[in-house]
């Protein structure tokens, strides 16, 4: 494992950290048995930084259950104050105390103000954020302080300069090189000796999936054996100013792949030819991506029940990925699709947000209330984007078709399948 020094704190942090936002699930809840094995495997292989947040479901409580004293001596714990829920000064103290109880620890190593832009930071400063930070430090409840940034790049340095921060967390990947902090912002933070933690290095998984034929050809021509995820992770870790990458691993396959990349990638180790390859793929993808969404989920929950990230993810995948070969119709029932006549994205849309596999979360449920707009780190016009998704996948009478498939078609399929087996 490669370790990188945070000059401001003196800590050496593994170049890959474990993000607890996307832990493996079972029946909609954290699969505690599988997640425990996954985290311990990460620690056994040198990962010493675990990142969670108050808003990441039940992850803080889960970590508090499994991280015993001997494990805690090997790792640094990072969690985040839910800035969006802070209405008054007392809320900050209340959230911190609750998080300490959830995590079952006395002191948090790295405490971040979650999801801020300049407007949110100013709101918190008016509620005595600085007083809260200084008191929490003096009381021994937190060691180091930082923020995760979800604003435009033009405001980033202003937020950095509003306090003597120890670390910052930003979105950074080869496709989004110049959003949020941007490369200039990262260099500015590095000049202050702060730690730089990177979220969404795979852009919500998009950069790890099967891409368009043209993008795949570029990568395979350069290196037949390297996966798309490896290219993306290496690109981020190649930046000498990046301390640690958090990729939201939720399987052993993903974890072992990331560990392998972290073990071999040192700052400035990519060749000029490799960097040229990534730049070409980026140009190819920019011509195909329809919505610049990272599926981070900060727009959720939607009052109308729209699964906003999944709707946009499926919409993007229709244009980004090659759907020739085999499609998965339902529950590992595959269909040979050599000419791409059936698009996997249409199947995915009706299964995962159309209501066939559970509650519906389709784009057509949006009533343009606008509550999601202020929470989007990308500052997308989510209402307009959902309208595009609706026009792409939905048609008159779809509601009744879905009801028929859900309540007649699939029960019939399951009955026949049971007889055959």
Image (cartoon, rainbow, N blue to C red):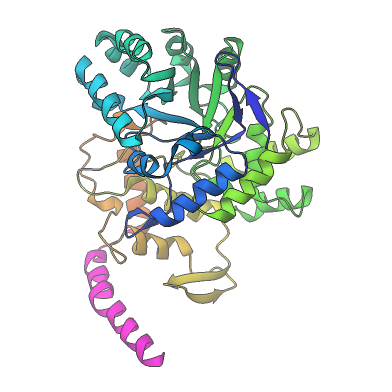
Question: Is 406 a magenta residue?
Answer: yes
Overall secondary structure of the magenta section: helix
Residue 221, how many percent across, how many down? Answer: 77, 51
Give me the residue at 24% from left, 46% from top. 366
Q: Quadrant of the N terminus?
A: top right
Viewer-proximal residue among 88 and 69: 69
Question: Is 57 a magenta residue?
Answer: no
Residue 395, how many percent across, how many down? Answer: 30, 61
Give me the residue at 39% from left, 53% from top. 32
Residue 99, how many percent across, how many down? Answer: 31, 31
Up the image or down, 201 lies above or below 8; here it is below
Q: Which residue is most to the bottom?
A: 419
Q: Quadrant of the C terminus?
A: bottom left
Viewer-proximal residue among 354 and 166: 166
The image quarter in which residue 60 lies: top left
Give me the residue at 36% from left, 26% from top. 106
Magenta-colored span: 394-421
Viewer-proximal residue among 368 and 416: 416
**Relative to 156, 97 lies left or right:** left
The image quarter in which residue 61 lies: top left
How many numbered discs sit on the rendered protein?
0
Up the image or down, 105 lies above or below 113; here it is below
């Amino acid at each position: 494992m490669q370790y990188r020094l945070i000059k401001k704190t003196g800590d050496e942090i593994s170049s890959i950290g474990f993000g607890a936002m996307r832990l493996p699930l079972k029946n909609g809840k954290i699969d505690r048995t599988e997640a425990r094995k996954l985290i311990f495997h990460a620690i056994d292989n040198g990962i010493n930084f675990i990142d969670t947040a108050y808003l990441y479901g039940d992850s803080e409580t889960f970590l508090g259950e499994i991280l015993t004293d001997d494990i805690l001596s090997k790792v640094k714990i990072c969690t985040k104050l839910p800035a969006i829920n802070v209405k008054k000064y007392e809320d900050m103290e209340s959230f911190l105390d609750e998080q300490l109880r959830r995590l079952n620890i006395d002191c948090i190593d790295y405490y971040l103000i979650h999801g801020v832009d300049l407007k949110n930071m100013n709101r918190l400063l008016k509620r005595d954020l600085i007083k809260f930070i200084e008191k929490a430090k003096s009381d021994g409840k937190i060691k180091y302080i930082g923020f995760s940034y979800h604003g435009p790049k033009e405001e980033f340095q202003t937020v950095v300069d509003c306090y003597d921060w120890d670390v910052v967390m930003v979105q950074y990947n080869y496709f989004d090189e110049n959003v949020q902090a941007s490369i200039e912002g990262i260099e500015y933070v590095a000049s202050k000796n702060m730690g730089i933690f990177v979220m969404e290095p795979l852009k919500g998984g998009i950069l790890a999936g099967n891409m368009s034929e043209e993008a795949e050809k570029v990568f395979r021509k350069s290196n037949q054996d390297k996966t798309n995820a490896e290219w993306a992770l290496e690109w981020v870790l190649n930046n000498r100013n990046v301390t640690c990458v958090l990729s939201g691993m939720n399987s052993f396959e993903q974890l072992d792949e990331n560990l392998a990349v972290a073990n071999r990638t040192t700052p400035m180790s990519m060749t000029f030819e490799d960097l040229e390859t990534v730049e070409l793929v980026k140009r190819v993808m920019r011509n195909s991506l329809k919505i610049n969404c990272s599926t981070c989920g900060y727009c959720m929950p939607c009052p109308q029940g729209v699964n906003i990230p999944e709707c946009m993810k499926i919409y993007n995948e229709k244009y980004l990925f090659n759907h020739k070969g085999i499609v998965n119709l339902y529950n590992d029932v595959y269909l040979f699709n050599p000419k791409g006549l059936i698009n996997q994205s249409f199947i995915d849309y009706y299964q995962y947000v159309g209501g066939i596999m559970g509650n519906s979360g389709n784009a057509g449920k949006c009533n343009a209330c606008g509550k999601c707009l202020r929470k989007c780190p990308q500052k997308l016009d989510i209402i307009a984007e959902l309208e595009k998704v609706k026009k792409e996948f939905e048609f008159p009478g779809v509601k009744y078709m879905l009801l028929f498939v859900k309540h007649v078609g699939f029960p019939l399929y399951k009955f026949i399948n049971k007889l055959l087996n």
